[in-house]
Image: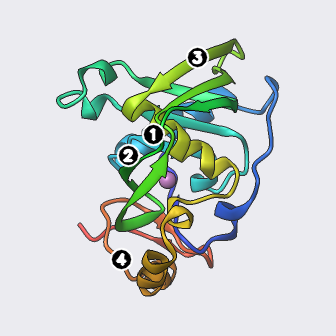
Amino acid sequence: MIYPIVVYGHSVLRKVARDIDKNFENLEEFVEDMFETMNDSDGIGLASPQVGKDIRLFVVDASPLEEDEPELKDFRKVFINPQIVERTGEKSNFNEGCLSIPNIREEVIREPEIRIQYYDKNFEFHDEVYKGVASRIIQHEYDHLDGILFTDKVSPIKKRLMRGKLQAISRGKFEVSYKTRLPNNKILFPQK
Ligand code: CO
């Protein structure tokens, strides 16, 4: 099932999401739906709050970036109850966008390397280190679980310049190729 993607201004994007356990109802199906929804919108990452669920789970599929970053070829994973336990290296800028904030991209400053502990869909524990683009994608999705959006992390000047565009998004004034859910829960279908 393809979920509509919740856009900027919806309260679920500002919640701190909660951990789940292995008895979470229909977990396997939900993970499948997350991948399906992400692929349908050509995303490389998607966090549960973006489909209206305040649980600590996100998916990534960086394989579309394979041409420029060959090591991302098989980077397709679900992260459940993740904890970033270390962020290291000199912070640098990287251009980010978000399915919940259509047609806005900005430079965001983050550490290059992270160590993350998480569970996979079989509730096997993992403890891994990521750098480069993979680390950026994970940090972006991880922020969603704490109610943080990349637009929170830009300079005050850029924030001011962006305000009008963000308000327009929350009123449904944008064009994308996927289904979206506005802050008032109205569903918008893409114009095809
Ligand atoms: Co995002």
Residue 67 seen in this snapshot:
yes
Which of the 4 image quarters holds residue 102? bottom left
Q: Which residue is mark 4?
A: 174
Mark 2–mark 4 Cα distance, whole angstroms, equals: 17 Å
* Residue tagged 2: 43
- Callout 2, which amino acid? Gly
The first of marks 3 and 2 along the sequence is 2
Q: Position of residue 28 (x, y in %)?
A: 63, 26
Q: What secondary structure is marked by label 1?
A: helix
Amino acid tagged 3: Glu
The residue at 61%/36% (across/down) is 30
Image quadrant in which the C terminus is located: bottom left
Image disc number at residue 151: none
Q: CA distance from mark 4 to mark 1?
A: 26 Å
Mark toward the start of the polypeptide (4 vs 1): 1
Query: How far, Cα to Cα, is label 4 from label 3?
Result: 37 Å
Q: Is residue 89 above or below residue 172?
A: above
Q: Which residue is mark 3?
A: 128
* Secondary structure under the numbered disc 3 in the rendered image: strand
Residue that mark 1 sits on: 136
Camera-nearest label, 1 or 2: 1
